Image (spheres, rainbow, N blue to C red):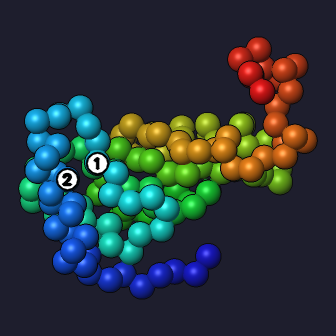
Amino acid sequence: MQERQAEPAGEQITRHVVGVAERLAPYRNVVVQLWNEVSTEWEGLLRAVNGTDPQRRVTSSPGVANVLGSDEHNAAMDLLTPHTVRRSAERPFWEVAPEQVASLIARWNKPVIGGTAAGGGTTLEQRPSPRDSREWTG
């Protein structure tokens, strides 16, 4: 994947993020997700939220499937929301994705919500069968 060049958070989007943070102030149980997938502006948006509501929990998904975030990104977030692996050549994604989440928890000691692994367009051959898990509802 080609790296995008970081750009300062645009004035308009920053105003919107500040407005959202202001309106959410009474709702302490709400987490703000800055961006979904690839964002070159997460740092500016994080500063905008933190400047408006320093106690707000903030996250941002760092990339597409199997992009778990840079050290800088993961260190800055209050909780991590990567899009875990969706397909794996070596092992089924439902085995790999939980390991990715566990490794992030161990390394960063933060809550991790592994995003949309099962929604990644798996084929019928890639999905676990009812024999693989009593929990599977298929």
| Residue at position x 21%, y 63% in the image | 16
As drawn, 13 above or below 97: below
Camera sees residue 18: yes
Q: Is residue 100 visible?
A: no
| Residue at x 74% of width, y 21% of height | 137
Residue placed under numbered mark 1 in the picture: 32
Q: CA distance from mark 1 to mark 2?
A: 9 Å
Task: Determine whether the residue tagged by mark 2 lies in a helix, strand or loop.
Answer: helix
Q: Residues within 10 Å of mark 1 (few under 14, many from 20)?
A: some
Q: Would you say 75 lies left or right of 66 here?
A: left
Residue at (21% x, 74% y) in the render: 12
| Residue type at numbered disc 2 | Val
Question: Quick check: 103 above or below 17?
Answer: above
Question: Pointers 1 and 2 in contact (CB under 8 A)?
Answer: yes
Q: Is residue 30 left or right of residue 120?
A: left
- The percent coordinates of residue 83 (x first, y second) are 55, 51
Residue situated in front as seen by the camera: 3 or 9: 9
Residue pointed to by mark 2: 20
Depth check: give the residue in front, 89 or 126. 126
Q: Residue 67, position in %: x, y?
A: 56, 60
Q: Which mark is residue 14?
A: none
Q: What residue do we see at 25% from left, 70% from top?
A: 13
State which quarter of the image contains the N terminus: bottom right
Q: Amino acid at mark 1?
A: Val
State the SS at label 1. strand
Find residue 69 and report its horizontal and vertical position in percent. 47, 60
Where is residue 86? Give x, y as percent. Answer: 69, 50
